């Protein structure tokens, strides 16, 4: 096992990784920008290194600075968390070249599966059903027009190198195609340095369902019960639950089995997530694969009792997986992302100082956060403040417990999305499990937090 690991991230995920390391007897090194000097992950680590000014492109995204920090502090491995450099194959290569273990998949896996078009081809060959769409990247607007006409509108334009909803545009008719193609291409180029696009048929009112996987790179794979991530705003997830209220037991077992088979075929290593769109008839289609630990991994952990990050570290250290095959789960869990955003003002992110903080507790409650009273939330990074994870024996009980927890949660000093989550939990369509990825747009007039 490693003796010392550098955590190349910040906020709650840095703390999450550090706790797993500590339980394995591993010392941790934090990296931080000058904006994060007082961050909790810096205070928690065995050692810490300042790697630059506030802007991520000058600190958390500077590969040589992070490699130097790891080497100078005697680290053997680097855990990237999620975001920043977590899915950057160049970073993984830099770790290898400097005799550091990258705690994640291989750089080849990231390159192949990070390209959305190539990933579709690879995983279709491994047995996953694929959304009808372009086989390769589009050669230009005429190619997009011909394919869209053949598929039938609506279609979705997507960035081949994309993620997090960037470089995506819903196109409802031929008249909208040129404007959206130009905008999506420009956004993709700006965000990812690549303007390659592809087009897919739109699955109307789908659920967004994902399967957590964990592989050892030698064909041994564990898969876990699906997470439903359909409560989204502009393709950004807000609330996740497991199991999905849409899937029946047969579909659940099939989708989990196919995910395991695909990951075994490609000999995937480390934690990852295979994401699907599922229609109202429970037909499911592969959408993309994320080659990292997910923000919402705790909901899987609380229904299985598995520490996914700890297993990820063990696999990277060359230890055998603790389990393989299809993993069962118990009860129902939900995760609520508490963001520093104002839902009444177009979800405008806000920085500020936490003047008061009161966290919920009780049975079946887990809080992942880096907040403390007096902490100043900087304006330079993702707006995620805390994740409230709630477990109970069944979905109705989980909803009731979640309402109680969110009512207990109190944060003063900046706006949050807490009240919007309470509105969602009380909405009849959500309570009955009758919702899709369009839920927020369709329900805006009924949600008081958006009024």
Image (cartoon, helix red, strand yellow):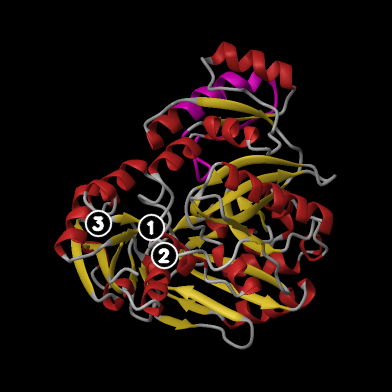
Mark 3 or mark 2, earlier in chain:
3
Residue 74 falls in image quadrant: bottom left
Using a 10 Å C-alpha cutoff, classify the residue at mark 2 as few (fewer than 14 neighbours), some (14 to 19) or many (20 or more).
many
* Quarter the N terminus occupies: bottom left
Q: Secondary structure at mark 1?
A: loop
Q: CA distance from mark 2 to mark 1?
A: 6 Å
Q: Which residue is pictured at 49% across the width and 60% down the height? A: 341
On the image, the x and y values in percent for residue 362 come to 61, 88
Q: Label 3 neighbourhood size at 10 Å, few (<14), some (14-19), many (20+)?
A: some
Residue placed farthest to the bottom in the image?
362
Instruction: Look at the image and give the residue range highlighted in magenta.
Output: 161-185
Checking the image for residue 262, the label placed there is: none
Q: Is residue 211 left or right of residue 182?
A: right
Residue 77 placement (x, y as % from top left): 30, 60
Q: Name the quadrant of the C terminus.
A: bottom right
| Residue drawn at 32 percent across, 74 percent down | 26
Q: In front here: 185 or 333?
A: 333
Residue placed under numbered mark 3 in the picture: 54
The answer to whether one can see residue 314 in this image is yes
Q: Mark 3 or 2, which is nearer the eye?
A: 2
The quadrant in which residue 122 appears is top right
Q: Earlier in the sequence, mark 1 or mark 3?
A: 3
Q: Position of residue 173 (x, y in %)?
A: 70, 23
Q: Quick one: 322 or 213, which is closer to the camera?
A: 322
């Amino acid at each position: 096992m490693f003796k010392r690991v550098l955590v190349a991230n910040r906020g709650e995920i840095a703390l999450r990784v550090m706790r797993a390391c500590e339980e394995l007897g591993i010392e941790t090194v934090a990296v931080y920008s000058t904006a994060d000097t007082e961050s909790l992950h810096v205070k928690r680590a065995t050692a810490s290194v300042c790697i630059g000014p506030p802007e991520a492109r000058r600190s958390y995204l500077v590969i040589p600075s992070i490699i130097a920090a790891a080497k100078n502090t005697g680290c053997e491995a680097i855990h990237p968390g999620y975001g920043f450099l977590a899915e950057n194959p160049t970073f993984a290569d830099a770790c290898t070249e400097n005799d550091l273990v990258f705690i994640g998949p291989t750089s080849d896996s990231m390159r192949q599966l990070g390209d959305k078009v190539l990933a579709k081809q690879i995983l279709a060959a491994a047995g996953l059903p694929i959304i009808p769409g372009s086989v390769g990247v589009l050669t230009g607007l005429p190619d997009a027009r011909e394919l869209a006409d053949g598929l039938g509108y609506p279609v979705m334009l997507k960035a081949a190198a994309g993620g997090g909803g960037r470089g995506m545009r819903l196109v409802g008719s031929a008249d909208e195609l040129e404007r959206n193609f130009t905008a999506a291409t420009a956004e993709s180029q700006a965000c990812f340095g690549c303007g390659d696009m592809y087009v897919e048929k739109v699955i109307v009112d789908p659920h967004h369902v994902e399967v957590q996987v964990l592989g050892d790179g030698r064909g041994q794979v564990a898969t876990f019960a699906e997470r439903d991530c359909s409560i989204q705003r502009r393709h950004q997830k807000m609330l996740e639950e497991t199991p999905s209220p849409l899937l029946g037991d047969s579909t659940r077992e099939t989708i989990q089995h196919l995910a395991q088979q695909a990951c075994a075929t490609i000999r995937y290593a480390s934690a990852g997530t295979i994401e699907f769109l599922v229609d109202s008839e429970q037909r499911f289609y592969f959408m993309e694969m994320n080659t990292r630990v997910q923000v919402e991994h705790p909901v899987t952990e609380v229904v299985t009792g598995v520490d996914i990050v700890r297993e990820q570290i063990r696999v990277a250290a060359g230890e055998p997986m603790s389990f393989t095959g299809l993993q069962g789960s118990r009860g129902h869990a939900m995760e609520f992302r508490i963001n520093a955003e104002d839902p009444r003002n177009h979800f405008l992110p806000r920085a500020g100082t936490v003047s008061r903080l009161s966290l919920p507790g009780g049975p079946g409650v887990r809080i992942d956060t880096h907040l403390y009273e007096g902490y100043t939330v900087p304006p330079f990074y993702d707006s995620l403040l805390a994740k409230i994870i709630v477990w109970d024996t069944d979905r109705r009980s989980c909803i009731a417990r979640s309402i109680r927890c969110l009512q207990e949660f109190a944060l003063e000093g900046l706006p949050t999305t807490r009240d919007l989550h309470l509105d969602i939990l009380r909405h009849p369509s959500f309570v009955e499990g009758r919702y899709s990825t369009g839920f927020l747009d369709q329900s805006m007039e009924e949600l008081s937090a958006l009024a």
